[in-house]
Structure formats: structure tokens, C-alpha cells
């Protein structure tokens, strides 16, 4: 078994106010932590990976195919692979959560 702690990793600010940390990765999935400041936006993007996540602090608004989805604290979500999506923190508090990707997203472009 491999183990990794969030505190053992530096976050990467991928766009203004959006901080990501690559955590554990296995053969079939990987885990990423996110911290999104109030007012920050994750621009629309897509990737081959299926993405499921859990918000444990504040709320995050996703835009997918012209629709908006508000994921509240303690809610989870699922985004199919290759589905263009964007997200925004419209609250006054940082949003924190976990994403799981399958297949593993061990070398995301934001790490470059």
C-alpha cells in the first residue's frame, strides 16, 4: 500500500485562485485535491478521464453543455470523459474538494 498526505505536497496555482495537488495514483485511478478561492474560475476544458468528485467546503458551480450545476458542501458529482466543463466559485469562501480520475491522471498538463 502507498500513502500520501496533502501536507506533504505543494499546491500548484493552475489559474488565478485555483490550487491543485496531485495525490495518490494507482493503476486505474488517481486522486487530486482542489482549493478554489472566491471568484476564481476554472476555464472550460476537457480530458479523456472520467471525473468524480466531492466538495467538502463551500459550493462550486459547474457549467456543462450550457447548463449550470451548483454542487453544495458535502455533495458529490460525476463528469464523463471528454465532456467539456468549467467551474466557478461564486461564494465568499474558498471551495475545497477531492477529484478522482479514471484512468489515472498522473501527468496533468497543469503540472508543466
Image (tube, grey):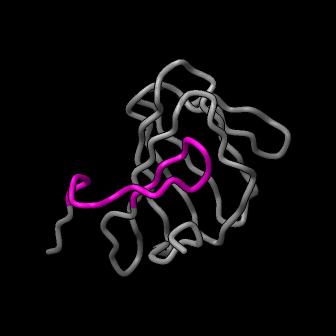
Q: Is 29 located above or below residue 71 in the figure?
A: below
Please check the rendered image and state whether residue 30 is part of the magenta-colored stretch, yes or no: no
Which quadrant is the N terminus positioned in? Answer: bottom left
The residue sitting at 51% across, 53% down in the picture is 13
Can you give x and y, in whole percent of width and height, for residue 94 in the image?
Answer: 46, 29
Which quadrant is the C terminus positioned in? Answer: bottom right
The residue sitting at 72% across, 58% down in the picture is 45
Can you give x and y, in whole percent of width and height, for residue 51 in the image?
Answer: 54, 58
Please check the rendered image and state whether residue 20 is part of the magenta-colored stretch, yes or no: yes
Q: What stretch is highlighted in magenta?
A: 5-21
Q: Nearer the viewer, residue 59 or 53?
A: 59
Q: Outermost residue toward the right?
A: 66
Can you give x and y, in whole percent of width and height, for residue 34 in the image?
Answer: 45, 47
The residue sitting at 45% across, 42% down in the picture is 35
Which quarter of the figure has residue 16?
A: top right
The residue sitting at 38% across, 61% down in the picture is 31
Q: How many marks?
A: 0
Can you give x and y, in whole percent of width and height, for residue 107 in the image?
Answer: 49, 77
Amino acid at each position: 500500500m502507498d500513502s500520501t498526505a496533502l501536507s506533504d505536497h505543494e499546491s500548484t496555482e493552475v489559474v488565478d485562485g485555483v490550487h491543485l495537488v496531485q495525490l495518490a495514483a494507482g493503476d486505474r485511478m488517481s486522486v487530486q485535491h482542489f482549493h478554489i478561492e472566491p471568484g476564481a474560475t476554472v476555464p472550460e476544458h476537457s480530458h479523456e478521464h472520467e471525473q468524480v468528485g466531492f466538495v467538502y467546503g463551500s459550493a462550486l458551480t459547474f457549467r456543462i453543455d450550457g447548463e449550470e450545476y451548483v454542487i453544495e458542501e458535502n455533495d458529490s458529482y460525476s463528469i464523463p470523459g471528454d465532456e467539456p466543463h468549467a467551474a466557478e466559485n461564486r461564494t465568499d469562501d474558498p471551495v475545497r474538494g477531492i477529484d478522482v480520475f479514471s484512468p489515472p491522471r498522473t501527468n496533468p498538463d497543469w503540472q508543466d
